[in-house]
Amino acid sequence: MKHLSLLLLFLTTTTYAQQYDLVIKNGRVVDGTGNPWYYADVAIKEGRVAQIGLISASEGKQVLDAKGQIVAPGFIDVHAHVEGDLERQPGAENFIYDGVTTLVTGNCGGSNIHLRAMFDTLRMRGFTPNLASLIGHNSVRMKVMKAAFREPTAKEQTEMEALVEQAMKDGAVGLSTGLIYTPGTYARTPEIVNLAKMAAKYGGVYASHMRNEGQDVQTAINEAIQIGREAHIPVQISHFKVASKPLWGLSTTTVAMVEAARKNEGIDVTVDQYPYTASSTSLQSIIPSWAMADGDSATLSRFRDLATRRKILDDMLASLKKNDRKNYEYAVVSRFEADTTYNGKSIHQIAGLRGLKTSAAAEADLVLALLEQAQMKRIQMVYHTMSEGDVATIMRYPNTMIASDAGVARFGSNMPHPRAYGTNSRVLGRYVRELKVIPLEEAIRRMTSLPAQRFHFTDRGLLRPGYAADLVIFDENTVSDKATYDAPHAYATGINYVLVNGIPVVENGKHTGKKPGQILLGSGYERE
């Protein structure tokens, strides 16, 4: 009996000793709530956080010594554009090296219409970060109305609502708009309200690239709030900014507008931002939207008609003047497939290379010429339009999330915005450590529990037992973005370990190639 008791004790101890898949020792836990960091060990089992506290190394099949580094929930990027990219580059290295474990795509009104099929394809192929998607209004409108510059008929409105409803049943987390882009620019507010009501019916969020981020930014904010009010839906204002030089400093007012809607009306509205003073979108966005009605062929025809071309140029020059700009030096080419030698150069510089007159009128005409050369295919740009002061003011607002507005970057290809590589690490390195705009714990809350709350990811965004084991381990003293506008292809540093659903996808600063990502479905999801 004595020998049997010793054997049972040995078996029990051995089983207990390795009850966890991984034990993270000696880390400083920042749990995502905004509370101060504290020393604790973290145990992971079957893709979940199993225990936080004092845990023996012998209890883990694997042990990771965090060596006093920060152990935090994985970062949730609520504004990404990865349709198609994630299928081609499932490792999503630029996001993963920046600590991102979950992406929300389908933003700015552009999404895959057939979400269920997209999700099935991704599950079959595998991918590294978790993914959720919005359903995009522009994509829905194009499907039903093409590029028509008019209000929808009753039948077309019903068809669009049906597409939104199906997307919500397929697992979308809400509706997005890109009201600064065609055909979103052609939509009036009631059209959006009715589509938002359909998303609200299934527990969705309304995420909007507003109609204007410059001279009419306050009107655009009011419209976003109005949609939330009338559709009874939470509002997420995308990449919140003031993108007009004469209005720099207005962020104190625009932030106050958001807070007033929350405090005075009880409208659930929040915002996100990227920590840069330049934006990135297409060259087409410079063109007045009326000129792009009815599709690319119609647009090119307008360019060829001298009188119409003159009207387009007049509108472009008026916009320049309105925004206190003398030329297009602020507009830098990121990706121009027709001539890659232009990548990284401003429209002003390209005009010089082409021997054109040094005038705003000549540069505006060059914009049209480039679009003609590309046959209206997307020309990606970087626009230097914001102030550092506004970036900091918006970042200090407690309801601001951090988001990249980026896609999956192909390392070494073109000249993308550096936000594709360094959004979170830039906040942690520059705005937390160097400038002390916000504390470390608050920055992490903006990257974790706040976005998880907004998009109803009920088991992510916090470091708690039972939650999904999406984790990031980084050195707060060295974490830094390395990507710049002139040299954008550089991964973030200082983020040494990243786990997605309990699986290490970065170890000692190196991507493991693992693809443990999951599709995060909205509350309206219905099985077929």
Image: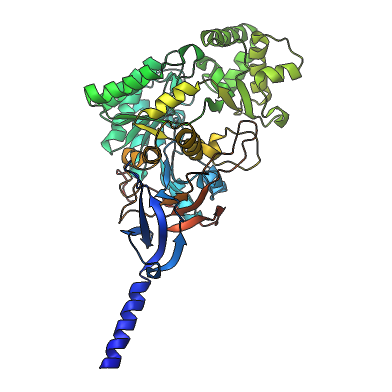
Tell me, yes or no, if residue 208 can be seen here.
Answer: no
Q: Quadrant of residue 76?
A: top left
Closer to us: 182 or 465: 465
Which of 55 and 481 lies nearest the eye of the viewer? 55
Quarter of the image holding residue 160? top left
315 relative to 259 in the view: left or right: right
Q: Residue at x 42, y 14 (%)?
A: 216
- Percent across and percent down for residue 469 are 38, 55
User: Where 214 falls versus 72 (above or below)?
Assistant: above
Given residues 265 and 141, the one toward you in this image is: 265
Across and down, in percent, residue 69 comes to 45, 51
Q: Height in image: 256 above or below 117? A: above
Asked if residue 24 can be seen in this view, the reply is: yes
* Numbered circles on residues, count: 0
The residue under the point 46% across, 29% down is 142
Q: Is residue 287 left or right of residue 241?
A: right
Q: Nearer the viewer, residue 517 or 510?
A: 510
The percent position of residue 303, horizontal first and vertical second, equals 63, 14
Asked if residue 107 lies left or right of residue 487, the reply is: left
Where is 480 relative to 277, above or below? Answer: below
Residue positioned 58% across, 43% down in the render: 491
Q: Quadrant of the N terminus?
A: bottom left
Image x and y of residue 136, in percent: 42, 33
Picture colour scheme: rainbow
